Amino acid sequence: MLRFTLYRLAQALGVILVVFTITFFLIRLTPGDPFAGEKAMPPDVRRVMEERYGLNKPLITQYFTTLGSYLRGDFQPSMKYQGMWNVKIIKDAFPISLAIGSCALVIALGLGLPAGIIAAVKKNTWMDYGFMSLALIGICLPTFVMGPMLIMTFGLKWRVFNVAGWFEKTDWVLPSLTMGLIYAAYIARLTRGGMLEVLNQDFIRTARAKGVPGSRIVMVHALRGGLLPVVAFLGPALAGITTGSFIIEKIFNLPGLGQHFVSSVFNRDYSLILATVVLLATLLVVTNFLTDVLVAWLNPKVRLS
């Protein structure tokens, strides 16, 4: 288990380095720069700004300088927001995305797991068809459709929640519900598939032949193996949920991390783009790493592969 964990950890660090390198050079190759605008900047001022942020140095020198600063934990200042450090921007925005994502994850697990388990236990019944039909609708509906539908229903028609913004304690409900319902659909289908595979195993038939109660067979014997696909899915899903969806934060006008990433791309803010991408990649890699370790703990065959 220790060897497996160290191997996955080395892979995770390598992936983060590759993402950092690719992102750094790609944003430098895109047209435009942080100092471009409707009004042309005077050459002297541009020269001073480029010298201030080290853009006048060779590209390879900029790369190693930036890499060194990231290894020291310095995310550098924003090139577009004068006097603002990227750490401060992320520190203010990330809790909003984390709060919405955490609520969405609770909704997704709270709805998806029971629906998948019931559908597997009640295979080929109206409950199975009903839950899986709802899950299929949830998967097919994109966030930019689900979000406006909830806004029209709960925000404009019934006036229960605000349609956009981050002003009241209940402003997390609609965006969290939008994300949670969609992820719940995936979790429900994965749970059903995993449970059905385990329920057809020989040891489940043996337990039934010995007279073990059906609830114990499902919750004790089948659930651990049946949830393996869900656990594997939770790695990228957890990173995507907790960092916030770009589309959802745009729809609900939330000052989260996704909103800042979109703005940094339009502003050609090299340092903020890189800081945001590295943070998102790190979260994705870390959650995948933890998922791999958890799956290996649940299924010893993975450790040996």
Image (tube, helix red, strand yellow):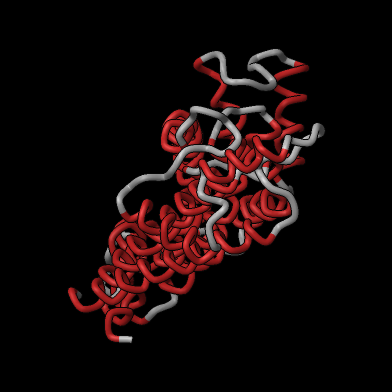
Q: Residue furthest left?
A: 2
Q: Kindly identify the residue that appears in the image at 53 percent across and 57 percent down.
A: 57
Depth order, front residue of 230/286: 286
Counting from the top left corner in percent of width and height, residue 144 is at 74, 41
Check the picture and name the quadrant holding the N terminus.
bottom left
Q: Is residue 87 visible?
A: yes
Instruction: Reply above or below: 185 against 35.
Output: below
Counting from the top left corner in percent of width and height, residue 244 is at 55, 41
Depth order, front residue of 47/259: 47
In which quarter of the view is residue 230 placed?
bottom left
Counting from the top left corner in percent of width and height, residue 92 is at 45, 28
Instruction: Reply above or below: 149 against 264.
Output: above
Depth order, front residue of 32/218: 32
Q: Is residue 246 visible?
A: no
Check the picture and name the quadrant holding the C terminus.
bottom left
- Determine whether, in the image, residue 21 is placed left or right of residue 292: right
In which quarter of the view is residue 216 placed?
bottom left
Instruction: Reply above or below: 259 against 137.
Output: above
Q: Kindly identify the residue that appears in the image at 71 percent across and 42 percent down.
A: 266
Counting from the top left corner in percent of width and height, residue 221 is at 30, 66
Q: Residue furthest bottom?
A: 305
Q: Kindly identify the residue that appears in the image at 37 percent across and 67 percent down.
A: 12
Q: Kindly identify the residue that appears in the image at 72 percent across and 48 percent down.
A: 142
Q: Residue furthest front?
A: 44
Depth order, front residue of 178/84: 84
How many marks can you see? 0
